[in-house]
Amino acid sequence: MPDLILEDRRESGVILLTLNKPDSRNALSPDLRKALTDRFAALYDDPDARCVVVTGDEKAFVAGADLKDMARMGTAEITRSNVRRMWQVIGQCPIPFIAAVRGVALGGGCELAMHADIIIAGEGARFGQPEIKVGIMPGGGGTQRLTRAVGKFKAMKMMLTGDPITGREAFDMGLASECVSDEAVLERALELAEQIAALPPLAARRIKEVVLAGQDTSLDAGLMLERRTFDTLFDTEDKAEGMNAFIEKRKPEFKGK
């Protein structure tokens, strides 16, 4: 059986994960969910990992859930399947995560992309939450993440009709960081990942941590968290290296310490 996820690990600390189930357009079957969960869980304790990029192929990022698997399930079975563990592990991943989206990103695919910190969308990409068309609703965070990303009225239109939007529309409504030609998606995502990987990894992790923790709190609570986390970076070697390199007009070498 071929690897469900192809991994390309670079000396820079960039890790490219390519979903590899073209026969089902990378539908989130139990085995692919487990593989994704395991790969992301491994990043938690990986001192060399600085940025992860997830992509599919030219036709599909992820086409959604595996309906052949879900069609036989009732409430008890879907609860016992523990599908939410994957979303928890990916959502709490401490390193920056970039989604490089070509082709369809539907249902769980759209939700997987929305777990990323940066989304690079191809012009030909298709984002959507079509669960209503098969009698269910988004269950991987779509009702909450999509609404926060694009606002209630655009999100409700997508979820209540199930109709997809293009990569360009996703960018225009705030669902994607950039929209580029389909051919340039992966190259651009990796370029950004290399840029991030060259910067101090402790600062990158703290930025992600504070943004995610603060987005659902009050402004005052978020600002307090920001101030306290900001202060902790002043005892790092990377802070000294970055500031000294700036003063000395040289390129810094960040070590994650």
Image (cartoon, rainbow, N blue to C red):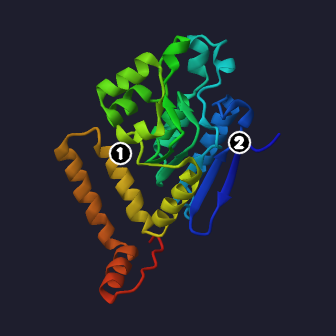
Q: Can residue 135 be seen in this view?
A: yes
Q: In this view, does 219 lie to the left or right of 151?
A: left
Q: Can residue 174 be seen in this view?
A: no
Which corner quadrant of the image does residue 3 belong to?
top right
Q: Is residue 117 left or right of residue 81?
A: left
Residue 161 horizontal/vertical position (percent): 44, 17
The residue wearing badge 1 is: 212
- Residue drawn at the location 34% of the way across and 87% of the way down: 249
Outermost residue on the left side: it is 220
- Residue drawn at the location 33% of the way across and 45% of the way down: 213
Q: Is residue 249 above or below residue 171?
A: below
Q: How far apart are marks 1 and 2 (CA)?
A: 29 Å
* Residue sitting nearer the eye, 153 or 249: 153
Residue 34 horizontal/vertical position (percent): 65, 36
Q: In this view, does 5 lie above or below 230?
A: above
Q: Which quadrant of the figure contains the N terminus? A: top right
Q: Identify the element where label 1 is drawn.
A: helix
* Amino acid, disc 1: Leu
The residue wearing badge 2 is: 20
Crowd tier of the residue under label 2, counting other residues whose Cα lies within 10 Å: few below 14, some 14–19, many 20 or above: many
Crowd tier of the residue under label 1, counting other residues whose Cα lies within 10 Å: few below 14, some 14–19, many 20 or above: some
Q: In this view, does 207 lie above or below 24?
A: below
Residue 156 horizontal/vertical position (percent): 36, 21
* Amino acid, disc 2: Asn
Outermost residue on the right side: it is 1
Q: Is residue 246 left or right of residue 83?
A: left
Lower sequence index among marks 1 and 2: 2
Of the two numbered discs 1 and 2 in the rendering, the one whose residue sits closer to the viewer: 2
Q: Which quadrant of the figure contains the C terminus? A: bottom left
- Residue drawn at the location 60% of the way across and 10% of the way down: 74
Residue 243 horizontal/vertical position (percent): 31, 79
Q: Identify the element where label 2 is drawn.
A: loop
